Image (cartoon, rainbow, N blue to C red):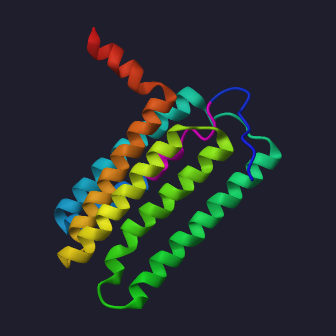
Amino acid sequence: MSRTVRAVSGIPLPQLEILLGGAGWVAGSLGFGAGGGTLVMAAGLLVTGWLFTTVRRRQGLGARLDRGLRARVLRLVVVVGVVLIVLGVGLPLIGQGWGELTVPAGAVAVGAGLCALSTLLGERSFVAVGGVLVVLGAVGSLLALNSGGAALPLGVVGIGGAVVLWLSGMRRIGLVGELRERVGR
């Protein structure tokens, strides 16, 4: 059983959603082909860079986690990373067409990891974002199995997951509220 520990000050891991969103955007842009995919990838990396810089300017490295909590978080990150590597290597080896499930299954693994991370950090927003990623992964898996191509599931899961992660990260650091105030003027 895990114990929830709240950071003393600041937001723990403020760049997490931004970086995961950038990785999802890159995976989603691979479904667009060489020409359009490169432009889509460049736009996503530009947004990721801007958001990352904004988060670093506002939050720095975030709240410092104590030693025990940091070890549990790192252990969870390693487990999710190993699952992603196994999925990335193992699914294409199973047979023809199974490689198309790599990105949707990866989204499910990241979503489950975010749900587990929410119990460690006490961030309830991770549960919502993780749940959305699990649903996107399931929808992407259905699309991959029914369409016979990798482009549609990559775009839906990768780009959709990136947008959800970016919006969650922006909300968590207070950027959504600030943008809402600016637009309201």
Figure check: 142 above or below 135: below
Quadrant holding the C terminus: top left
Q: Residue furthest top?
A: 185
Residue drawn at point x = 32 percent, y = 69 percent: 141
Q: Is residue 14 magenta?
A: yes
Q: Is residue 129 magenta?
A: no
Q: Is residue 165 above or below residue 144?
A: above
Q: Give coordinates of residue 8: x percent, y percent.
A: 74, 28
Front residue of 90/5: it is 5
> Where 155 falls versus 181 (above or below)?
below
Residue 23 visible at all: yes
Residue 10, located in which quarter of the rendered image? Answer: top right
Work out which residue is located at the far right of the displayed protein and give it.
67
- Across and down, in percent, residue 56 comes to 55, 34
Asked where in the image residue 123 lies, by quadrant, the reply is: top right
Identify the residue at horizontal 22%, vertical 69% (top origin).
Answer: 151
Residue 40 in the image: state x and y as whole percent.
Answer: 24, 54
Which quadrant would residue 183 be assigned to in this image? top left
Residue range highlighted in magenta: 11-20
Vertical arrangement, residue 141 with respect to residue 169, above or below: below
The residue depicted at 29 percent of the width and 84 percent of the height is 97
